Amino acid sequence: RIERDHILLQQAHLENQLKLLQDQINPHVVFNILNHIHILMKTDTQLADFLLMKFSDILRYQLYHCKQPLVPLYKEIEYLQNLVEVEKLRWGNELGVKASWEIDNRKTFIAPLLLVPFIENTFKYVCRLPGHKGYVKISCKEKDNNLYFYVENPYSDMATHKKKDGAGGIGLQNVKKRLKLQYPDSHDLKIESDHHIFKITLILTLSDHHEL
């Protein structure tokens, strides 16, 4: 009985940890997008309307589809695509964005919002110094129940220094913790920073069940 109670306590603790980590999606993106929509309403109402619809889809997914331990991978990817589309609209010609998504199996599942900090960070820390057009590369491919995720962006020491949480950011620390808790033996995360290029490679073994 004591052993059983101990296991239940451990499980409750892990669930609370995961909930806390999942809830720590950086709110700065929300405020920035809302501010951009507010500005666009005065200059380009059609674009503002489109951006608002995309943003509504993002919030709807976060509020109503992320309460389960796992969500369908294709739904999570649709959410990430909307997030990238909103960022592309926000930055326009200031930023070159290349994103590829190859998801064939619609029956695989992934922990919700796990990949969001990678997307947030790459747009937050990408180099936008005068005379340098920044770029973001995103590649996401599912094959044989494995997810291959890659993000790349140039960064500057000046911009990174101004943002106190550093090039990695608190978001990446949360992802590492979630991976350790939810995918302890089924992930490979590589973070590289060389010649002012930041690269993240994640290989994740996906589940074909609703629960971890």
Image: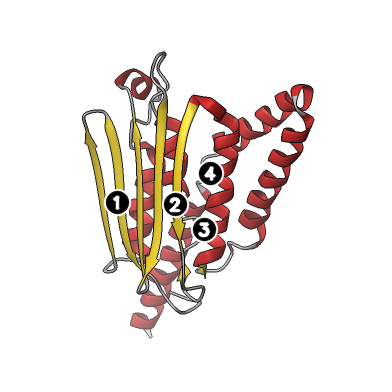
Q: Residue at x 50, y 46 (%)?
A: 24
Q: Quadrant of the C terminus?
A: bottom left
The quadrant in which the N terminus is found is: bottom left
3 or 4: tag closer to the N-terminus: 3
Residue 4 lies, with reference to residue 115, above or below; the image says: below
Looking at the picture, which amino acid does disc 2 mark? Ser
**Badge 1 local density, few (<14 within 10 Å), some, or many (20+)?**
some
The residue labelled by disc 1 is: 201
Answer whether labels 2 and 1 touch (C-beta < 8 Å).
no
The residue to which callout 3 is attached is: 77
What separation in Å lies between label 3 and label 2 (alpha carbons)?
11 Å
Q: Name the secondary structure under disc 3.
A: helix
For mark 3, does the 10 Å Cα neighbourhood hold few (<14), some (14 to 19), or many (20 or more) residues? Answer: some
Rendered image: mark on residue 100: 2
Q: Disc 4 on helix, strand or loop?
A: helix
Res 155 quadrant in image: top left
Residue at numbered disc 4: 84
Q: Quadrant of residue 67?
A: bottom right
* Label pair 1/4, CB-CB below 8 angstroms: no
Percent x, y of residue 123? 46, 35
Comparing 167 with 50, the one in front is 50
For residue 53, which numbered disc appears in the image?
none
Earlier sequence position, callout 1 versus callout 4: 4
Image position of 5 with respect to 156: above or below: below
Q: CA distance from mark 3 to mark 4?
A: 10 Å
**Residue 185, located in which quarter of the rendered image?**
bottom left
Dot 2: element: strand
Farthest residue toward the left?
194
Disc 2 to disc 1, C-alpha distance: 14 Å
